[in-house]
Amino acid sequence: MAVVAPLLVAGRWRAARDHAGSFRAVDPASGQAIGPEFPRNGAADLEEAVAAAADAATVLAAAEPARVAAFLDAYAVAIDTDAEALVELAHAETALPAPTRLRGNELPRTSSQLRQAARAAREYAWTQPAIDTAAGLRSHFAPLGKPVLIFGPNNFPFAFNAVSGGDFAAAIAARNPVIAKAHPSHPATSRRLAEHAHRAAAEAGLPPATVQLLYDFEPAFGLDLAGDARLGAIAFTGSRAGGLALKQAADRAGIPFYGELSSLNPVFLLPGALAERGEALAEEFAASCLLGSGQFCTNPGLVAVPPGAAGDAFVAAAQARFAAATPMLLLSRAVLASLERSLAALCKGGATPLCGGTASGEGVRYAPTLLQVAADDFLRAAHVLQTEAFGPASLLVRCANLAQMQAVARALEGQLTGTIYRAVGGSDDALWQTLAAVLRPRVGRLIANKMPTGVLVSPAQQHGGPYPAATHPGFTAVGLPASIHRFAALHAYDNVPDALLPSELRDENPGGIVRRIDGHSTLADVGAAP
Amino acid sequence: MAVVAPLLVAGRWRAARDHAGSFRAVDPASGQAIGPEFPRNGAADLEEAVAAAADAATVLAAAEPARVAAFLDAYAVAIDTDAEALVELAHAETALPAPTRLRGNELPRTSSQLRQAARAAREYAWTQPAIDTAAGLRSHFAPLGKPVLIFGPNNFPFAFNAVSGGDFAAAIAARNPVIAKAHPSHPATSRRLAEHAHRAAAEAGLPPATVQLLYDFEPAFGLDLAGDARLGAIAFTGSRAGGLALKQAADRAGIPFYGELSSLNPVFLLPGALAERGEALAEEFAASCLLGSGQFCTNPGLVAVPPGAAGDAFVAAAQARFAAATPMLLLSRAVLASLERSLAALCKGGATPLCGGTASGEGVRYAPTLLQVAADDFLRAAHVLQTEAFGPASLLVRCANLAQMQAVARALEGQLTGTIYRAVGGSDDALWQTLAAVLRPRVGRLIANKMPTGVLVSPAQQHGGPYPAATHPGFTAVGLPASIHRFAALHAYDNVPDALLPSELRDENPGGIVRRIDGHSTLADVGAAP
């Protein structure tokens, strides 16, 4: 048997017990396998991981928030300190641009996210303590007391990595252990991150199984794992088919499943905006759609174009930009295969390619691809024409009139984002109102005059949305402290004496936590003069 | 065909279109059918209800919160004004005590709950506006834009009625229309409530299909309905088997399902408490368990009793009280049949009856029933011995030592509540800490020295808990504004100009709404000096 990389289970790095084969990362630029062999885990490894995490959950739930915060802060420092090596690994495994994307953007976003989670933990910002003095009731959001299983996606080796990303930061901030199922397209990056996490957790005095790392397993094992009632919650970012299969297993076991599945992020161009700055909008659209080879969950995958010369000019300008761009590196052969399948489905559904549509060059590359379809045809096959083509591709829906634009909005499934471009001068605002009323309940984030690809880590963010873009419309995967609520249980205490309460629910409030006492937000102690 | 009562669909009271049979209410005291025939609805009625609700949802989402609040307030007044007639109907259909329970307690609780929901709507208390000025992001909780389907239980004809209870108040406060599936054991009560609701909604200018009422349908239609993707959420209070079947249908369609299923509400008696006041605890337990014939979701269905003379004395005192009580009226023959099935399952699992165990007398009555089992035996068959026996019944688990008490706690499934009785003097507090650590993650509300049956409508309430007592540990069915969050979507606005934002997210805050601006709670306008 070949020597394979160790996994992190129950507090130590060890060889897989019953691995079912192994795999290597692939450099998308060359198409060649790189780095060591990594194990595909078997049932014994998964069982040990869940059992260890369940034990750790009890300890962690009782830990001081400051301890968890210290871990998150130290982990952030370790990532920043080791940035060069991490970026080198991630670049080799994903072909994402090293200086601009990985070093300049994603890595600092990741450590900043961990620090924001540390702060939320330290300040009890997510716990929302409520005290009803007359009723003798006190409540707050608390750890689940069970582990969180996280499935990371292929497209963010740091910021959404199961062992370092937003789900990880949120689950840990709520003092739940994490079983990280890293994406198999960047195993060495995930391993190095997990080394930092494991060390920082140990130094902060957290239980050894606070962070565990698995690389890959057969789908059947994944379904068994997702249905394991010892889990407290599951977070998944990835493909819709995979996510829905796991969700079904989790649903049956009563485990909250937070999936961020796929989204077209429709963009609607109102006539006034096009008249004002059509050429600039084409530039903005092409830049957003081709950024990172289009491999974002918020990539603009559908653009509703109004009729007339301005619409035609927009299409021509966008097409010129797509056609002029060179074939783009994709994250993996799996992404390429999925993109080809999706584009074929779109064409079969009635879309016509304007440019691109071909794999080409050394490594894993695909030509930027623009398709179009008449709104009439879109409306006739709205389900299949909402197939997500993950990569540098987008579908232009040519509307014959503004009523069709609204009909397109009405036919949309749930989306992470919806964008409307309006005239800065205000001439589109009546149209905005009508269209936004249709779009609003169908999207998580409604955007004006900006492409959807930027997703700031900010408290008012909503990176989620109605099904099937996400699996619950009330939660967000990005933005602290809101994202932590996915991993929290609401705990009430009834008639419990002060000394036996959790510290943030006691009469005295020395830590200056914002609490709702008898319906009013306050920093005061219970019983203090108002 | 017999004349059957009308249903409320699409804004009018009309005969069922395709009803599959009909049914009448039964007076549990006499066992005789009373009142008119009510229709069991067929597919055409359900389809019309969903279509009408989906249209109403769009209108309602755009309505002023003050309008919804006016409806809820007017409905509360109508219920209070019509109290005598409502209580008479409900008493006839449920046999619940008219003056004490229905008139003195449940009806005022119901109108108070509607008023609290009105206040939450008017004050935007549930919307949690957040504004990040630098990021240009603003978010709040908003209506789902889709209808809420509510299944009411048999045991609260007013306070949990699908057309007047806590779920109804919360769904309407978030400006979602309600399709109420009233419980078929009290159809005339539900009909009269719906008449008030419909009138009040019309007077407040809300869309005609804001409130709709269905009485009953075949399970297969219920599953189709629960899987209808036009729904925004489903709330269910009732039996575990029925709830889980509906949940599965909802899960497949990606519809958030909030089930409040069943719970044993375990009570742990610590030795110091028993030594201090064993006789009083037996009295408290019997009173709580037999209140309302034991037909509460928070009925104490399991009591862990410590070893020794004090434990024996508690059991003897409780047994004497149960044995002395006369057979108790149940809500329906279905409740009686279910109670008999559950008690048979408990006995088969190893429990022994101490008293009761028989139906008797005129109408639907059952003798108060106390069972016991040794903790060893409980632990060997912990799943079957956690069968809920809904009615005047409870299982005493006799622990041979304190470690067994903990093991019993560890074997518990998710519960709405968990109670620990401790010595007021504090001698049990070390034991409390150990036991509470085990119990805490398994229950929604942790109670000290008080029986679980009282569930105050108060902001810090948690009437929910880990699966399978409830279907999501982060939500509550009782307590405003928290219960509203089940029926809300998180909506972000990115770069949207002030004039195009919802009023509570604009720069100015004339309504005095508490908002988080750049992470700080404030009543100020955006840009005001801090």
Image (cartoon, coloured by chain):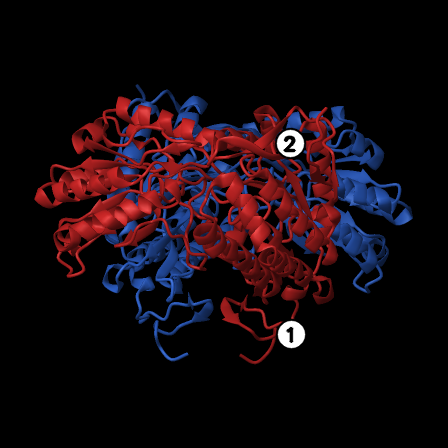
Chain colours: A blue, B red
The Cα atoms of the two marked residues, 2 and 1, are separated by: 52 Å
Could you tell me which secondary element the residue under label 1 belongs to?
Answer: loop
Q: Point out the tag, 2 or 1, that comes first from the N-terminus.
A: 2
Label disc, if present, on residue B37 of the rendered structure: 2
- For badge 1, the amino acid type reads Pro
Circles 2 and 1 on the same subunit: yes
Residue A232: horizontal and vertical position, in percent?
A: 38, 40
Residue B66: horizontal and vertical position, in percent?
A: 67, 63
Q: Nearer the viewer, residue B194 or A197?
A: B194
Image quadrant occupied by the N terminus of chain B: top right
Could you tell me which secondary element the residue under label 2 belongs to?
Answer: strand
Q: Residues within 10 Å of mark 1 (few under 14, many from 20)?
A: few
Point out the residue furthest to the right here.
Answer: A309
Chain letter for mark 1, please: B
Chain letter for mark 2, please: B
- For badge 2, the amino acid type reads Glu
Q: Quadrant of residue B374?
A: top left
The residue to which callout 1 is attached is: B510
